[in-house]
Image: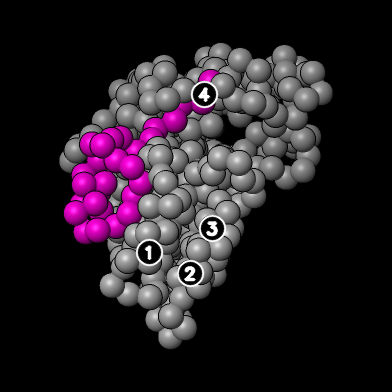
Amino acid sequence: MKKIGIMTTGGDCSGLNSAIYHIICGANKRGWQTYGILNGTDGLVAKTPQIVRLTRDVLPPEQAYIAGSILRNGNTGQDNNFERAVQTGRVQQFTNQLKKALAATKLDAIILIGGNGSLSLAWKTRNIYSDMQLVCIPKTIDMDIPLTDRTIGFDTAVSQLTRFCDDLMLTARSHHRWFVVQSMGRKCGMLALTAGVAAGASAILIPEIKFDVDKLIRHIKTADTDYGIIMVSEGISLRGHSGEPATMISRKLTAAGIANRTAFPEHIQRAGNTTPDDRILAARMADAALNAIANNETYVMTALHGDDIVTVGLDAVSSAGRPERDPNIDGLTISNATVDDDNPLLVAANNMNIYIGETK
C-alpha cells in the first residue's frame, strides 16, 4: 500500500481543495493512504512535523469547492522557507532539514500543487525528493506556467474579475465615467486579457504588448460611449512614471480631461467558489497525478494539452517559456509563460475595437 503526501505551496487560488479532494478519492480506490503536509515547508520542518491523515471526512465533497487550501500554503512567519534560508546563509542546512523531514514521513510519493516558482524550485532542489516520487500539479490564477494549456484556479479568477467589472460597469454608466481596473497576473497578461474580453472592456493593457498612451486616450475620446472599463495588468510599465499601473494610466486620462476612477479587485481574484471548469480540471489532473505515481513516474508535472491530460518533465517546464532569474534565490531560474503574439483572443479583441496596444 502506497502512502501519498500532498503539499500546496505558493500563492493562493481557488481549486486547490478540489484537487486535494479528488486525490483522496482516487488514492482510496487504489487502496493507498493520503497525508496532507500543512503549511508547506514551514510545517514539514517544524519541531513536530505538521502532517495529517486525509479522508473524505476531513474534506467532504460539499466543502471541496471552497477557495483556498485546507492544507494552507506556508509563509507562517517561522522563516522555514528557501528565501529565508538564502538570506541567512543556511541553504544547505535547510535543504538537509527538508530531506531528513521527508524521510521521516516514510511517504512513497509527494504530489506538490504549486505555481511556477514552486515548480521551478522543486526541480532545482530535486535531490530532496530522491527517495520518493515527485509529481506536480500546476495551479495559478496568472496562467504563467509553460507547457500546459490551463492551470487550476485560472477560470475561477477570470470569473471573479469579470463579475467585479460587471458591477463597476453599472456605476460607470450612471456617472458617465471610466474605470481603470488593475488585475493580477504579474508579468503575464492572460488574466487581464481573458477577463477584459469577457467583461467588454474598451481597452486592455498587458505586459507583452507595447502601448501608446496618446493612442489609448484618442481611442477612449472617440469611443461611441462615455463610460466603460479599461483593464490594466499589474505587470505593465510606463516609461518615466512610477507607482501602481492603474494609477499611472488614470493620471494620464485625467490630464486629458477623461473622467475616471481606479479600481483594485486585489485578492478577490484568488477567492470565490471554484467554477465547474476548474473543478473538472482539478479532478482530471488529480487522476493524472495518481496514474503517474502508479506508473513510477517522477519529477513530472500534469498538463492539459488540447483535450488530453499528460505529464511533462519538470526539466522541460523549468527551461520553457521565458525563464528569468529569481531575485531572491541565487541560481534559481523561474519559468514563465506569457501571452503569445498569435493568441486568438488578441485577434478577437482587436476585431471588437478593443485597444490592446500596438500589435503587428
Among the two numbered marks 3 and 1 on one chain, the one whose residue lies closer to the N terminus: 1
Percent position (x, y) of residue 147?
32, 29
| 180 on left or right of 329 | left
Among the two numbered marks 3 and 2 on one chain, the one whose residue lies closer to the N terminus: 3
CB-based contact (under 8 Å), mark 2 and mark 4: no
Q: Residue at position x 61%, y 45% from top?
A: 241
Q: Nearer the viewer, mark 1 or mark 4?
A: 1
Taking depth in this image into account, of 269 and 71 the one nearest to the observer is: 269
Q: CA distance from mark 1 to mark 4?
A: 35 Å
CB-based contact (under 8 Å), mark 2 and mark 1: yes
Question: Dividing the picture into quarters, in which one does residue 38 lie?
Answer: top right
Taking depth in this image into account, of 5 and 219 the one nearest to the observer is: 219
What type of secondary structure mainly makes up the magenta span? Answer: loop
Q: Residue at position x 72%, y 18% from top?
A: 91
Residue on which disc 3 sits:
252
Among the two numbered marks 1 and 4 on one chain, the one whose residue lies closer to the N terminus: 1
Q: Residue at position x 40%, y 55% from top?
A: 216
Provide the secondary structure element on which disc 1 rests.
Answer: helix
Residue on which disc 1 sits:
220
Residue on which disc 2 sits:
258
Among the two numbered marks 4 and 3 on one chain, the one whose residue lies closer to the N terminus: 3
Q: Is residue 201 at all visible to an observer of this figure?
A: no
Q: CA distance from mark 3 to mark 1?
A: 12 Å
Q: Amino acid at mark 2?
A: Ile
Among the two numbered marks 2 and 4 on one chain, the one whose residue lies closer to the N terminus: 2
Q: Is residue 340 magenta?
A: yes
Question: Dividing the picture into quarters, in which one does residue 315 lie?
Answer: top left
Percent position (x, y) of residue 224?
28, 72
Residue on which disc 4 sits:
324
